[in-house]
Image (cartoon, rainbow, N blue to C red):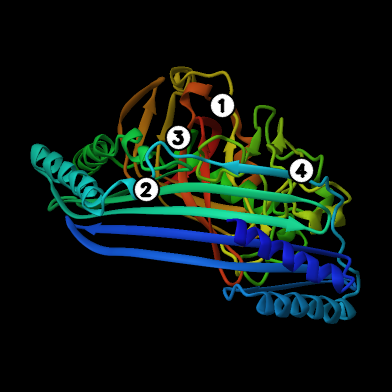
C-alpha cells in the first residue's frame, strides 16, 4: 500500500500547488469473489478487482470530483486539475457556495484481521459449504414430506483497502474484509401453493463468519416454517389489534422510515430525483414522532458488523447517531457539506463503495435500542393480536410516510399466548402512527441483526448495512390480510 499512499499524497501536493481551498484523495482497492448455487448446481463464480484513485476539490464555492484507474503521476495530475476546474465552474452557477464543516485532523489505521482469510479456503471447500446448505433444505423437505423445488445460496466476499488523505492533515489507512450470505428457499404443496423465505447475513469478518452463522440449521428452520405456513396458517384478524414486530421487521422499519428520511442530503432535496424525498424538514428537529420508549440509532462502530467503519470517507471519526431519542427527532445523518448547512459537525455518514464513486450520506447499522421487556411480557396482556416475526414483502412511498409490510412467519396472539400461524398479515401504517403506537421494546438478549445492501445514488451505490433490534409492541393498529 506504500505506493498507493505515495500516489494519494502526490494528488494532494498537486492540489496545493493549484492553490485550492480544500482537497482530498482516496485510493481504494476492492477484491470481490462471488459464488452462486442454484438448486444444488454452481451457477456463478466471479472474481472482480477494482483499483483506483479519486480526488475531490472544494474551490470557488463549488465541489469537483474526478477519478482514474490509471495510476501514473501524469494521470493523477490530470484528474486533480479536472476536479479543480469542475469546482470553479460549478461554483459560478451556485446561488450559495458549498462549505465543509470544521473537523479535526486525524492520523490513524483501521485494520481488521480475519481469523480465516478468504484466500485460505479453497474454491472447492466454499462450494461444498453451500452444497451442504442446499442438501439440508432438501433433506428437511423429505423429512416433512414437502417439496422444496427452488433454492438459491449466494456467498459474496469483499476485501476493501483504502488510503485517505486531505489538505487539512488527515491520513487514514483501512483494511476491512466482509462476507455476505443470501439464502432463498421455496416450498410447495399442491393444496396450498408456494411459499418462499429469504435470509441475509453479513459481517466484517473472514470466512469464520460462515461457521458462526449455523447456516444449515437456519435453512432447516426456514423449511420448517414454510411447511407450517402451507399446512397450518389461517387468515389473520382484519381489525384493530395489538401487533408485535420481530427483529427482522423492526430493522426494516428503522432503515426505511427513519434512516432514509433522516439523511440530510435527502432532506435538502438532492435525492429527490434519484431515490425520493423526505417528510422530514429542518424544523422537525426536537419534535415528537414516537413514544418515550423509542430510541432509533445508527451506529457504524459495532465491531464486526456488516456496516462497520471507524472513519467515514471524508476522514471523520464515526460514532453512534441517535436519530430518535425518547421519541424525539434528535439528529440527522450528515456529511461535511450538509453539516455546514445545518451549522453542526459531521457525524461521519459519508460513504463511498468504490474509487470512482463520490462519498454521499449513508446509513451503517440502523436499529432500535433495547428496552426492558421479555418476549412473554410483550404478549402476556394481548387479548387478540399478531406476532409478525419476519416479512415477505414491503413497500414505502417516496417521502417515507405511508408504508406496508406483509408478514411471512406470523402468529396469532390470543389471551397472551401464541395460538397458531396466520398467513400474510398486512400492516399498512404511517411513520408517525407506527412510532407513536410503540409502547414496549424487548430486552437486549432479544436483539438480532440482518444484513442488506442499501441502494442510493446515481450511479447507484450498493452499500453494506445491518438492520435489526429487539421485538417491539404496537398498540391498537389496523391489520389487513
Distance from Cα at disc 1 to Cα at disc 3: 11 Å
Identify the secondary structure beneath mark 2: helix
Q: Which mark is residue 441?
A: 1
Looking at the picture, tell me which residue is in the foreground, 431 or 6. 6
Residue at 72% across, 43% down: 317
Residue 315 in percent (x, y) is at 72, 51
Tell me the distance, in whole angstroms, between the alpha carbons under discs 3 and 4. Answer: 25 Å
Which marked residue is nearer to the observer: mark 1 or mark 4?
4
Give the structural element (helix, strand or loop) at label 4: loop
Q: CA distance from mark 2 to mark 4?
A: 38 Å
Tell me whether circle 3 and circle 4 mark residues in contact (CB < 8 Å).
no
Report which residue position mark 4 lands on: 331
Q: Out of 27 and 351, give the one closest to the viewer.
A: 27
* Residue 248: image location, x then y, percent: 45, 40
The 10 Å Cα crowd at callout 3, few under 14, some 14 to 19, many 20 or more, is: many
Mark positioned earlier in the residue sequence (3 or 4): 3
Within 10 Å of the Cα at label 2, are there few (<14), some (14-19), or many (20+) other Cα atoms? many
State how far apart marks 1 and 2 are (Cα): 38 Å
Q: Which residue is mark 3?
A: 246
Given this view, does label 2 or label 4 mark the residue nearer the observer? 2
Q: Where does residue 432 sit, x and y in percent of width and height?
A: 66, 44
Cα separation, mark 3 vs mark 2, equals 32 Å
In this rendering, is residue 15 above or below 31?
below
Q: Please identify, in this view, whether the residue under mark 3 or under mark 4 is nearer the observer.
A: 4
Which comes before the other along the chain, label 1 or label 2?
A: 2
- Residue at the disc numbered 2: 118
Residue 417 location, quadrant: top left
Dot 1 lies on which element?
Answer: strand
Q: Is there a contact, CB below 8 Å, between mark 2 and mark 4? A: no
Front tag of 1 and 2: 2
First in residue order: circle 2 vs circle 4: 2
Question: What's the residue at 37%, 48% (across, down)?
Answer: 118
Amino acid at each position: 500500500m506504500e505506493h498507493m499512499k505515495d500516489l494519494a499524497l502526490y494528488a494532494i501536493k498537486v492540489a496545493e500547488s493549484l492553490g485550492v481551498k480544500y482537497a482530498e484523495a482516496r485510493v481504494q482497492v476492492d477484491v470481490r469473489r462471488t459464488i452462486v448455487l442454484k438448486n444444488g448446481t454452481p451457477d456463478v463464480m466471479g472474481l472482480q478487482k477494482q483499483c483506483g484513485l479519486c480526488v475531490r476539490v472544494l474551490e470557488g464555492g463549488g465541489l469537483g470530483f474526478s477519478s482514474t484507474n490509471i495510476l501514473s503521476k501524469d494521470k493523477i495530475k490530470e484528474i486533480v486539475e479536472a476536479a479543480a476546474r469542475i469546482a470553479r465552474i460549478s461554483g459560478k452557477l451556485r446561488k450559495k457556495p458549498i462549505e465543509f464543516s470544521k473537523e479535526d485532523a486525524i492520523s490513524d489505521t483501521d485494520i481488521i484481521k480475519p481469523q480465516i482469510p478468504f484466500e485460505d479456503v479453497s474454491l472447492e471447500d466454499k462450494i461444498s459449504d453451500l452444497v451442504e446448505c442446499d442438501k439440508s433444505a432438501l433433506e428437511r423437505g423429505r423429512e416433512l414430506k414437502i417439496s422444496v423445488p427452488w433454492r438459491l445460496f449466494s456467498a459474496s466476499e469483499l476485501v476493501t483497502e483504502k488510503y485517505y488523505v486531505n489538505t487539512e492533515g488527515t491520513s487514514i489507512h483501512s483494511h476491512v474484509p466482509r462476507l455476505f450470505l443470501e439464502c432463498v428457499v421455496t416450498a410447495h404443496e399442491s393444496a396450498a401453493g408456494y411459499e418462499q423465505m429469504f435470509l441475509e447475513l453479513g459481517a466484517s469478518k473472514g470466512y469464520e463468519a460462515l461457521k458462526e452463522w449455523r447456516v444449515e440449521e437456519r435453512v432447516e428452520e426456514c423449511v420448517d416454517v414454510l411447511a407450517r405456513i402451507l399446512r397450518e396458517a389461517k387468515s389473520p384478524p382484519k381489525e384493530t389489534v395489538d401487533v408485535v414486530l420481530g427483529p427482522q421487521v423492526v430493522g426494516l422499519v428503522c432503515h426505511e422510515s427513519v434512516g432514509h428520511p433522516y439523511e440530510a442530503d435527502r432532506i435538502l432535496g438532492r435525492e429527490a430525483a434519484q431515490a425520493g424525498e423526505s417528510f422530514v424538514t429542518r424544523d422537525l428537529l426536537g419534535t415528537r414522532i414516537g413514544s418515550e420508549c423509542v430510541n432509533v440509532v445508527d451506529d457504524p462502530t459495532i465491531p464486526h458488523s456488516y456496516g462497520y467503519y471507524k472513519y467515514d470517507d471524508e476522514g471523520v471519526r464515526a460514532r453512534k447517531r441517535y436519530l430518535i431519542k425518547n421519541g424525539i427527532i434528535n439528529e440527522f445523518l450528515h456529511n461535511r457539506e450538509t453539516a455546514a448547512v445545518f451549522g453542526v459537525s459531521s457525524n461521519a455518514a459519508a460513504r463511498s463503495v468504490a474509487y470512482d464513486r463520490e462519498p454521499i450520506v449513508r446509513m451503517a447499522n440502523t436499529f432500535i435500542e433495547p428496552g426492558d421487556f421479555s418476549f412473554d411480557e410483550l404478549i402476556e396482556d394481548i387479548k387478540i393480536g399478531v406476532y409478525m416475526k419476519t416479512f415477505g414483502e414491503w413497500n414505502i412511498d417516496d417521502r417515507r410516510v405511508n408504508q406496508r409490510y406483509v408478514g411471512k412467519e406470523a402468529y396469532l396472539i390470543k389471551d397472551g399466548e401464541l395460538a397458531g400461524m396466520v398467513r400474510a398479515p398486512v400492516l399498512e401504517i404511517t411513520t408517525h402512527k407506527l412510532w407513536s403506537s410503540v409502547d414496549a421494546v424487548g430486552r437486549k438478549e432479544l436483539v438480532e441483526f440482518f444484513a442488506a445492501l442499501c441502494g442510493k445514488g446515481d450511479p447507484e451505490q450498493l452499500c453494506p448495512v445491518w438492520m435489526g433490534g429487539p421485538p417491539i409492541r404496537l398498540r391498537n393498529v389496523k391489520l389487513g390480510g
